[in-house]
Image: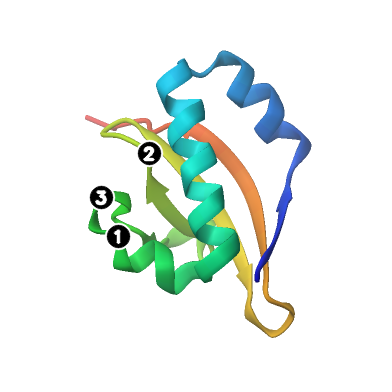
Amino acid sequence: MWSLFEDKLVKKQLKKAPKEIVAKYEFWKNVASHDGPKGLRRLSGFKDHSLKGGWKGARSSYLNKQWRVIYYVMAQKLEIIILEVNPHEYRK
């Protein structure tokens, strides 16, 4: 069993998110707490992947085409630290 910790910012972001995103996030948390990052990678719909650049060391999962969960994995402690749930910004 993995422990999940949410940054304060996550609660504010979820208040602004559509209901279907909040429901998908709750499903994401359920998978993450039971199976950790391996479980998230097994479900292809999340398109879980590592990040580069300023987010190097963090991971991202899709909640839908626009919304993402950004998080860090502390594998030694079986912890996941959720940093953000936000609409992904596409650059032109």
Please state which amino acid type lies under the numbered disc 3. Gly
- Give, as a three-letter code, the residue at label 2: Leu
Q: Which residue is mark 2?
A: 63
| Residue at the image position 64 percent from the left and 47 percent from the top | 83
Q: Give the residue type at disc 1.
A: Leu
Foreground pick, 75 / 19: 19
Which numbered marker is on residue 45? Answer: 3
Q: Categorize mark 3 by other alpha carbons within 10 Å: few (<14), some (14-19), many (20+).
A: few
Disc 3 to disc 2, C-alpha distance = 8 Å
- Please state if 5 lies on the left or on the right of 44 as rendered: right
Q: Secondary structure at mark 2?
A: loop
Q: Which secondary structure, mark 1? A: loop
Q: Position of residue 14 (x, y in %)?
A: 60, 24
Q: Which percent across, then down, holds residue 34?
A: 56, 65
In the picture as drawn, the residue positioned furthest to the right comes out as: 8
**Label 2 packing within 10 angstroms: few (<14), some (14-19), many (20+):** many
Q: CA distance from mark 1 to mark 2?
A: 12 Å
Q: Are marks 1 and 3 in contact (CB under 8 Å)?
A: yes
| Residue pointed to by mark 1 | 43
Mark with earlier residue (3, 2): 3
Vertical side of 46 occupied by 53: above or below: below
